Amino acid sequence: MTAVYADYAAAAPLRPEAHAAVLEALDAGLGNPSSAHDAGRRARARLEAAREEVAAALGAHPLEIVFTSGATEANNLALAGVAAARALPIRIAVPATEHASVLAPARALAARDHVLIALPVDATGRTAPAAVATARPDLVSAALVNAETGVVQDVAAFAAAARAHGAVVHVDAAQAPAFVPVTVAALGADLVTLSSVKLGGPAGAGALWIRRGTAVVPLAHGGPQEQRLRAGGENVVAVTGFATALALAVAEREREVARLGTLRTRLRAGIAAAWPGARFTLAPDVPSTPHVVSVVLPGIVGEDVVAALDLEGIAASTGAACAAGAAEPSHVLVAMGRTAEEARGALRLSLGWASTAHDVDAIVAALGRLRARVARRSEEAAWPALGS
């Protein structure tokens, strides 16, 4: 049984307010929002209320919001939809540290004659705007907040460099709204991805903001829903919970950033004391969100640490959930200049709306016990050699 949850970057626990909104919507007897009868009209009213709430959080117009099943679908629609709207192959630029839901569709497009440019990152995982200008892309996609390290990309400068060459700019903001202001005017983007489950909303909901006038071709056909960009009946229940969670995250952001910043400092100090030699992926002064602590524990594989913590009732990960169980080292850390061995030893601990100081102390205590076991095994393994 999980006693301490430290994997918010993968999926945040459902907020009580979002849970209540979902239950209320389930009990309302809603119909298909495209239907003309009473149950359909009531579903449509809830859907459009949620759309207005999401748009307000972004400083956008409601008709620019396209609801999706989550960030992965939104990212695919952004990249594949823009590429399909062009008559000729385009140049697509993506930082090497991007999430698989951006890298995979970008690579799929490259296999269909489009050109993929992997933008370099520095040791903190950030891409210089000059690299974007040099690439001269037609489409550029970048995460505002990296899911594995929490580093904040300067996407406004990024977007300005891209737009100077006429590029369409997509920002994956799935990890961002609870920690970083996400307004479309400030980002300077043409498309922005949001996720429900990262905010404490239900799974199965997300959104893609599309600036009016941006040409996008739908991935699925069969109906006029979502401005004819996503055929099929909308998940009104999940979208209702998503809008509730997003509004709460935005309203609580300033307070939560301060609170989680204190918890992160406590966690980093505790890990440094419990595991001598631990190396944090980011220095404290690197612009990053307070919910992620990425650390390399020398002499042990990150997956083994995750398994050991799980046995103690602590949920953690090595990196993005989409890569869990993969034999390959973290592509994010390798792109940042870490060795494959270091990347395999990475542990990601991510906090959120329900995290407490007790959780942090429990994580540190568990890591201390694990470190002691590792040390004992090292001594036992060395004993025959010492006695020979």
Image (cartoon, rainbow, N blue to C red):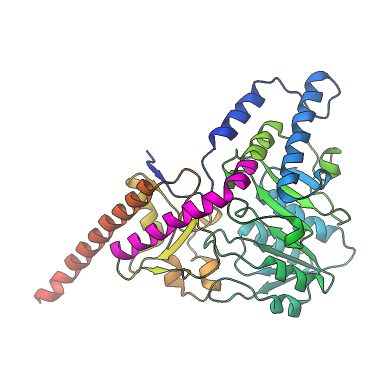
Question: Who's the residue at 39% across and 54% down the image?
Answer: 306
How many numbered tags mark residues here?
0
Q: Quadrant of the N terminus?
A: top left
Q: Residue at x 87, y 56 (%)?
A: 215
Residue 286: x and y in percent read 52, 70
Above or below: residue 378 compared with residue 26: below
Q: Can you give x and y, in whole percent of width and height, for residue 349 in the image?
A: 44, 55
Any part of residue 48 in sight: yes
Q: Does 63 appear in magenta?
A: no
Q: Percent position (x, y) of residue 322?
A: 56, 54
Question: Nearest the camera: 152 or 373?
Answer: 152
**Residue 365 position within the rendered picture, expressed as x and y whole percent measured from the top left:** 29, 53
The reply, left or right, for residue 192 in relation to residue 213 is left
Q: Which residues are magenta?
A: 246-275
Tell me the quarter of the picture where residue 370 sits: bottom left
Q: Main secondary structure of the magenta part?
A: helix
* Magenta run includes residue 269: yes
Q: Which residue: 78% across, 20% down?
A: 39
Q: Is residue 20 above or below residue 109?
A: above
Would residue 187 appear left or right of 346 to someone viewing this image? right
Viewer-side residue, 58 vs 343: 58
Q: Is residue 156 above or below residue 206?
A: below
Q: Quadrant of residue 155?
A: bottom right
Q: Nearer the viewer, residue 105 or 135?
A: 135
Quadrant (top left, top right, bottom left, bottom right) of the C terminus = bottom left
Viewer-nearest residue: 110 or 277: 277
